[in-house]
Image (cartoon, helix red, strand yellow):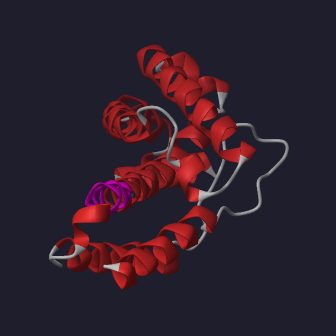
Amino acid sequence: ESQLDNEFQMISAHWGEVTVPFLDHPSKVDDQLLLGDLSNLLNSIKITSEKLNKMLSNRFVKGIEKQVLKLSKAMALFMNIFDQWQIFQNNWKTVSTLFSQGIVRQQLPHQTTRYEIIRKKWQDIIQHSLTDNKIFHVCSYTNMLEDFIENNKSLEIILDGISEFLNSKRELIPRLYFLSNVEVINLFST
C-alpha cells in the first residue's frame, strides 16, 4: 500500500510540473497561440493513464482510490482537449487569415458574426493559457473542452459557408475552377 502511494505521489508531482508546449507567441497577433509538437506530451498522458488504470486494479488502492480516479479523469480530459485544440488550430489558421481581409467580411456578414464569437472565446482561452503554461492551469479553463468542440463545429460551418465567396472568386478568375475549395481557401488566406 505504501509503495503504491509513493508511486502515485511521484506521478502526481510530475504532472504538477508538466507544461504545454506552445510555439513562440507572436506579440502583434492577439488571436494566435499555436501548440508545438505534442507527440511527447500525448505519449506521456497515454503512459500515465495506463499506469493509473493498473493502480486502480490493484487491491491496495483503496486508500488513494479517489485521488487516482481524479488524476485518471484529468488525463482523459487533457487528451480530449488537445485533440480538439489541434483540430481548432488547423482550421483557425486558415479562417482567421481569410477573415482578416475586409472583402471577406463584407461578402460573408453572417459568417463574420460567427467568426467574431469564436474569436472572443479563443482570445479568452489564450489570455488564460499565457498566465501559466502548466498543463493543469491551462486545462483548468472553465468549459475548455466544450468551447473547443463548439468552436470546431462553428469553424466547419464557416468553412462550408465560404463556398459562395469562392464561387465569386472563381467567376473573376476562371483558373480557380481547377483548384479544390481547400486549395482556393489556402490561396486567399496567404
Nearer to us in this view, 101 or 5: 5
User: Which residue extends farthest right?
Assistant: 27
| Quadrant of the drawing holding the N terminus | bottom left
* Residue 12 placement (x, y as % from top left): 49, 67
Nearer to us in this view, 83 or 166: 83
Give me the residue at 53% from left, 28% from top: 121
Nearer to us in this view, 30 or 176: 30
In the picture shown, does residue 163 fall above or below 189?
A: above
User: What secondary structure predominates along the stretch shown in magenta?
Assistant: helix
Residue 52 seen in this snapshot: yes
Span highlighted in magenta in the image: 65-74
Give me the residue at 47% from left, 78% from top: 39
Residue 158, quarter of picture? top left
In the picture shown, does residue 169 fall above or below 76?
A: above
* Residue 63 placement (x, y as % from top left): 29, 63
Nearer to us in this view, 156 or 16: 16
* Residue 54 placement (x, y as % from top left): 22, 80
The total of numbered circles placed on residues is: 0
Give the side of residue 169 with respect to residue 145, left or right: right
* Residue 104 placement (x, y as % from top left): 55, 27
Question: Does 42 appear in magenta?
Answer: no
Give me the residue at 56% from left, 21% from top: 105
Residue 20 seen in this snapshot: no
Give the side of residue 109 with respect to residue 126, left or right: left
User: Which residue extends farthest bottom?
Assistant: 3
Give me the residue at 45% from left, 79% from top: 6
In the picture shown, does residue 11 fall above or below 78?
A: below
Give the side of residue 60 with respect to residue 185, left or right: left
Residue 103, quarter of picture? top right
